Amino acid sequence: MITEILSPKQTGNHNLKNYEEQYNSYEWDQAEQQFSWHTTGLVNMAYEAIDRHADLGKGSNVALYYSDQNRKENYTFQEMKEFSNKAGNVLRNIGVGKGDRVFIFMPRTPELYFVLLGAIKLGAIVGPLFEAFMEGAVKDRLEDSSAKVIITTPDLIGRVPVDELPDLQKIVLVGSSVEEDAQTVDFYRHFETATTTLEIEWVDREDGMILHYTSGSTGKPKGVLHVHNAMVQHYETAKWVLDLKENDIYWCTADPGWVTGTSYGVFAPWLVGVSNVIRGGRFSPDDWYQTIEDHQVTVWYSAPTAFRMLMGAGNDVFNNYNLSSLRHVLSVGEPLNPEVVRWGMEVMKLRIHDTWWMTETGAQLICNYPSMEIKPGSMGKPIPGVEAAIVDDKGNKLPPNRMGNLAIKKGWPSMMRAIWNRPEKYESYFLSGDWYVSGDSAYMDEDGYFWFQGRVDDVIMTAGERVGPFEIESKLVEHPAVAEAGVIGKPDPVRGEIIKAFISLRDGYAPSEELQEEIRSFVKKGLAAHAAPREMEFKDSLPKTRSGKIMRRVLKAWELDLPTGDLSTMED
Ligand code: WT7
């Protein structure tokens, strides 16, 4: 097979000039000297990302370009320092301290970033929640982590089942005309009068910082804990992979409810002191192109789904905007189809650089670099300091071109440090103690490029969002008409996968369009809009193992017209 190769731009003056050389010689402690713990032993991510630049003469540089339909505001590093200090003081005054779980459940606004940084300055562990979550999803996460405080808005507070969360002490509402009571705190009232200086809680680099809940194929969503030490990798990948330089204007389109929106929407760009664009509101091709043009974005990090939607909107839309400021474009979240890379070459005259990582890995691990040849369809090569391999189920390395488990040698700086409350779950990620097993299957070619093949488990990636089938199935069977439900990801040209549910109904219910609609909105209201099945099929019964586990593999085979494989465990 002949693989297409896209060469780097000859003129590029890239931060990572020679990948092979750097890969062979790099040790992580080269980066560690950048940070304060090198001299003091203690550190704080928010200080390193914001205050350090303000204190070292870059206070008047723009840190944040924020815009949405109603607001357009810029904040310098000095202002971000002061506003996050104020937010930190508001939180400290209501009792937030080191190690407390503080959830943030609000749309992207400057205030979200003030409270996120402010809470981290106090040494709290922040749990960011995607604003589209509904009550059930919010409750699971706050309950599992015994959250002490939630910061939300008057619009969203209705989805926080306060009475069912005995550990929740305070609710901070960011909005107008908030009525305070013993539990409810009016954010703006206290923010206005809070002082702009704050005593930072200096923590150990191994102390908890952020808790991202993510889905697996079974069980409830799990809390992936990251520590301040992740900054080492955020910092290095901001240089090597995002290729950020002093005057760049960077835009990561992800919401901070997901790990991309924190690791690469907050930490990485600010650790290297560049201007960060945040666009609130919903996706639309015109809006996104306009954002790039308005801010003269130079480095852009987005997802295959978004690129496919932009591609689908047509080149005429693209041609209405001037995107000539763009220098470097990256993608994450799902396989980046070669077709999309070709579209990027055609319209932007730029390569789209695929990057591979996960919530659990905390930062990029396998990437395409600006200075490197790209094979469209490949995720690239491991970053310096990281060993990646394809291993069999026992942890033995497989030779090139053999498909197996994509695994990473344990110990990279941004690796998760725990699954909240579930040590056995955490351990289950590691094979023979040494290899972190990703749950993705892939192969490595003879040149060391990695090629994604699929998820080993049943996790669904829809429009870049990771959803566990079990969570949706559990919600579906709560509906009075549903007896059993099995959920799979069905391949979709735009969204990567869409959610399809197979449902058997209880006696007395018959399939109908109305019932489908009702079930769909039941999941939307109970979990989140993106978790609702786009397609539903009613069946008299579902394929199950003798132990009663629904066999999603069989559902998938039905759907795709594939052989169903070994059915020995299936009940009659
Ligand atoms: C899963 C992790 C942290 C990134 C956002 C998603 C899939 C991620 C790629 C890629 C093919 C990819 C994998 C992975 N994935 N990047 N470049 N090519 N697949 O984080 O929600 O934790 O999902 O996303 O299947 O396991 P996540």
Image (cartoon, grey):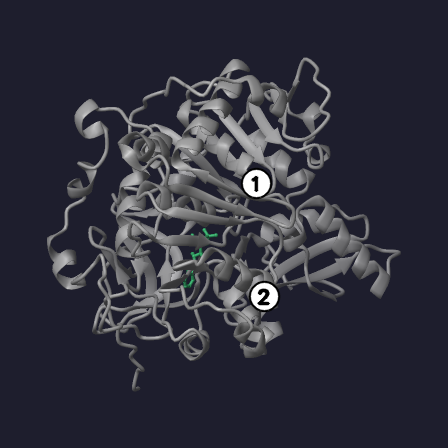
Mark 1 falls on what kind of element? loop
Amino acid type at image mark 1 = Thr
Which quarter shows the C terminus? bottom right
Vertically, is 447 above or below 298?
Answer: below
| Real-space CA distance between mark 1 and mark 2, rounded to the nearest whole angstrom | 21 Å
| Residue pointed to by mark 2 | 285
Question: How far across and down, in percent of the image, does residue 18 sit?
Answer: 16, 63
Amino acid type at image mark 2 = Pro
Q: Looking at the image, which residue is at 27% across and 69% down? A: 449
289 relative position to 131: left or right: left
Which residue of the protein is positioned furthest toward the bottom in this rendering?
1
Pointer 1 with pointer 2, Cβ within 8 A: no
Q: Residues within 10 Å of mark 2 (few under 14, many from 20)?
A: some
Q: Looking at the image, which residue is at 31% across and 59% down? A: 366
First reached walking from the N terminus: tag 1 or tag 2: 1
Q: Looking at the image, which residue is at 57% across and 78% down? A: 316
| Residue pointed to by mark 1 | 109
Question: How far across and down, in percent of the image, does residue 127 sit?
Answer: 51, 34
Is residue 547 visible to us here?
no
Q: Quadrant of ligand 1?
A: bottom left
Question: How far across and down, in percent of the image, does residue 110 sit?
Answer: 53, 38
Q: Is mark 2 within 8 Å of ligand 1?
A: no
Which residue of the protein is positioned furthest toward the right in this rendering?
508
Quadrant of the rendered image containing residue 301: bottom left
Question: How far across and down, in percent of the image, does residue 95 sit?
Answer: 52, 14
31 relative position to 531: left or right: left
